[in-house]
Amino acid sequence: MKRYRNGEIWDFEHETPVSEDRPVILGLDGGTTSTVCICMPVLPFSNPLPDPLPVLARAVAGCSNHNSVGETAARETLEQVMADALSKSGSNRSAVQAVCLAVSGVNHPTDEQRILNWLRDIFPIHVKLYVQNDAVAALASGTMGKLHGCVLIAGTGTIAYGFTEDGREARAAGAGPILGDWGSGYGIAAQALTAVVRAHDGRGPETILTNSILQELDLCSPDELIGWTYADPSWARIAALVPVVVSCAEAGDEVANKILQDSVEELALSVKAVVQKLDLCGEGGACSRGSIVGLEFLHERDLQGRLQKMTKVG
């Protein structure tokens, strides 16, 4: 077995006997905040599938979006989480039959091919490899495996992705914070930090976000936010402030409320764009199935109402 450049990650294989009659598959969900890998036995095709599915092991690691942490760090995270899952399950790469990797940051065929080349260097030639954007896996999980409809992911980042029954696909947003993933956790928190600075300068209205964020970060003055922010401007670190924004909105702060309302509007626009590109709404406004993932920072009912108004998604 190849050691690859991170060979020490796989040192456990020298001590792990593998049962030849238990082939396994690896499934990965990689995002900007965390990456999860599960190891499952290969199952015969059946309808319905066992419920719950027999998961042999589960491993969690950090960010695997190469646009956020760089390709080297992303690869190391993905390799480590796969090794951990195999080790916990008492398996190794010789038992793997397929790897399905759904990760944020896969935005172009060149991204997919780079990751496929890297996986091919790690696993035996017989292993089947699949690489997709994490939105594809999210849609499949919300529609029982059928890639037809629209999914909205709103976590640290955000993306809307859709498929038609004949295989056409479209996406909106998902371009990262610099290009405007408004509606994402990062976008919400970044706007809150900006609101605090504007209020401190006298360029914007006063807001309880100031005291709440300073208290959360153990800082004394808004001036200190500059050093805190640029010391480590990682997406997940900024997005971790979203619960503070939600608390301030619930307390009646107009600035925080407007940030969340604007975010709902942006998320709804993303879904509307995909629905219109693919003509997912038929005559009479009947729309294909859909799924919403990761809305821990917004009131889902607010978003559902806006979606129904703008896209007639019901």
Image: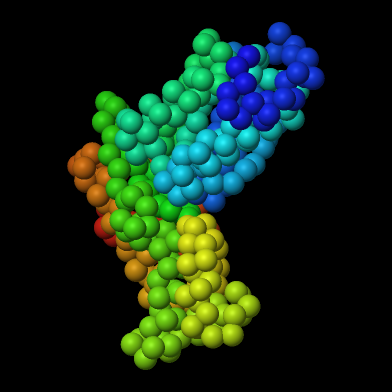
- The picture places residue 305, in percent across and down from the top left corner, at 37, 61
Which residue is at 48% across, 67% downward?
A: 230
Which residue is at 35% across, 86% downward?
A: 204
In the image, taking residue 177 as reference, residue 75 lies left or right, namely right
- The picture places residue 16, in percent across and down from the top left corner, at 77, 19
Which residue is at 57% across, 37% downward?
A: 76
Q: Residue furthest front?
A: 5
| Vertical placement of residue 79 versus 228, above or below | above
In the image, taking residue 14 as reference, residue 31 lies left or right, namely left
**In which quarter of the view is residue 165 placed?**
top left
**In which quarter of the view is residue 108 placed?**
top left
| Vertical placement of residue 15 versus 265, above or below | above
The number of numbered discs placed on residues in the rendered structure image is 0
| Vertical placement of residue 264 versus 274, above or below | below
Q: Nearer the viewer, residue 88 or 302?
A: 88
Does residue 52 appear in this view? no
Quarter of the image where the N terminus is located: top right
Q: Nearer the viewer, residue 232 or 169?
A: 232
- The picture places residue 131, in percent across and down from the top left corner, at 44, 28
Which residue is at 30% across, 56% downward?
A: 179
Q: Nearer the viewer, residue 21 or 93?
A: 93
In the image, taking residue 225 as reference, residue 55 lies left or right, namely right
- The picture places residue 111, in percent across and down from the top left corner, at 37, 33
The chosen color scheme is rainbow
Does residue 80 appear in this view? yes
